[in-house]
């Protein structure tokens, strides 16, 4: 028998609606000799989805960088389940999993628009870096932290 | 006094509405050390705009390739007027200038969304190639030719 | 007390010399707004090193593909330890870790030429796919298997 | 009878040896669905050849940028004569054609290693820009100008 969840656990479960969705299309320049998206192409799409997700909640990545805070990728793990062919449309689904200090973990799936095919799943970790001295920040800029906190708890 | 145009000249002037417009955004992976889009990035955008233009008039480029007709770029000339910064939005404006046998000429401008800034102007020539033997086709596939002919005369 | 290794264990330990080394240089087109190699750049370098490693042992990747065997990446994990700045030289060190049927695991480090700085560490898994039907092969092409087997046992 | 050249004309004729040669190889990530290098790939190679040419004459491009002088591409024209297939080796041949104030013109050919096949010919114009204010410089930094002057007269 499964132990019943505590009453507040429901809220801790991220509802499926909380995925941010970013549409993509395999253009000729994304393909390789096999006629499918080259495996590095998806890395760029993960970044685009992340930047647009942040924009959708009021964080302009270019502004953040101009303010002296960079968010480089420090870890990335990706599984390729099925290739996307030239011309195919897809949806990058992104969500923020956790903030641990200045580390921010993201989860991704790239799917067909109808959700029937899973092309890629990935996890990416960012860390906040002070652009002036190149060092890892002790804490996120307050406005960024507050905005991101809503996503994690959302 | 300006010489009056011959009566058919009006129709020969392509109205400004005939530009196909394709929106773009400078993502981090498009930038270089200068914080602006790397100059090769625009080449990919020209291709994306061309493919989406063809899609908008019923020509699926992937289908065309599957049918054995490729349209490689054989000439490209591009002028960079002003750099696009990270995060900036732009519009690729594309139009087909002429079909000369199996050569297809395109004209491009990349502008700010409000049309006030011109970032890039470019011309691209494609040629139809038979994928089986790698040779230049003697004529375009009839359905492609008919569809494109409407654009040039439009 | 540590259990003594069986006498043949020494040979199973891959000597450090067995890393294949592939030199790289951060060119302007590799950089992003931060003046360092964009994080997807390294993915291309891992592939280049792998292809050149195979070439160095007599396997021409283009020939393999022409014969109907593709080796797509199915998993990739990468850690970014330190950014490589524009103009910096580096060395991609690659070795094959294991063949498990048609899955081939690779290990990578990207270092400074003097070996003092570690920029990236990564693991990549390839799987052999039949290009005609798109399915995973039951076994590697015999000549490929024999050639790769020497690397693993080497 | 051919008119004799003035005595200093010999030196003005650029001998064929003055091409800088930069080797390239079509890697899988360079290819597109047609199994040949995607047309934007060559743009990156032109840049790599230019940077390495400058390095060979003592100009480190990253140092130049750090000193506040950027050399963005302002015009580029390229003709694609023949596609390079995956795995093929080539040579980018680059030479500086002229300096007109702060504009620097380059000429390029991408050939097969044996010189028998011409894949690409291209011309690129750079202009010197002050990184602090983003404006075109009135003159090149003196050390750069002196070094480049040797190439043009060479």
Image: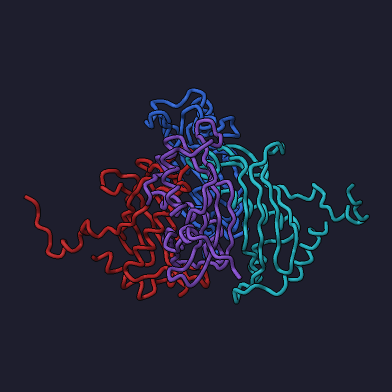
Chain colours: A cyan, B blue, C purple, D red
**A4, B94: nearer the viewer:** A4
| Residue at the (68%, 47%) spot, across then down | A109
Counting every numbered tag in the picture gives 0
In the visual, does B99 lie left or right of A41?
left
| Residue at the (48%, 39%) spot, across then down | C140
> Residue C4, relative to residue B128: is it above or below?
below
> Residue C54, relative to residue B51: is it above or below?
below
Residue B13, percent across and down? 51, 36
**D107, A69: nearer the viewer:** A69
Res C67 → quadrant: top left
Q: Is residue C139 visible?
A: yes
**D62, A2: nearer the viewer:** A2
**A61, C154: nearer the viewer:** C154
Q: Is residue B16 visible?
A: no
Residue B121, percent across and down? 49, 50
| Residue at the (41%, 42%) spot, across then down | C62
In the visual, does A46 lie left or right of C8?
right
Residue A18, percent across and down? 79, 50
């Amino acid at each position: 028998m499964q132990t019943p969840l505590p009453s507040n656990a429901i809220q801790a479960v991220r509802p499926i609606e909380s995925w941010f969705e970013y549409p993509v299309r395999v253009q000729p320049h994304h393909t390789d000799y096999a006629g499918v998206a080259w495996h590095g192409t998806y890395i760029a799409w993960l970044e685009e989805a992340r930047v647009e997700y942040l924009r959708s909640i009021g964080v302009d990545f270019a502004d953040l960088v101009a303010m002296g805070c960079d968010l480089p990728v420090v870890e990335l793990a990706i599984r390729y389940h099925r290739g996307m062919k030239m011309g195919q449309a897809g949806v990058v689904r992104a969500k923020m999993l956790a903030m641990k200090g200045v580390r921010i973990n993201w989860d991704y799936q790239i799917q067909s628009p109808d959700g029937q095919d899973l092309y890629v799943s990935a996890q990416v970790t960012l860390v906040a870096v002070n652009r002036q001295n190149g060092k890892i920040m002790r804490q996120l800029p307050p406005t960024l932290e507050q905005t991101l906190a809503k996503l994690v708890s959302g």
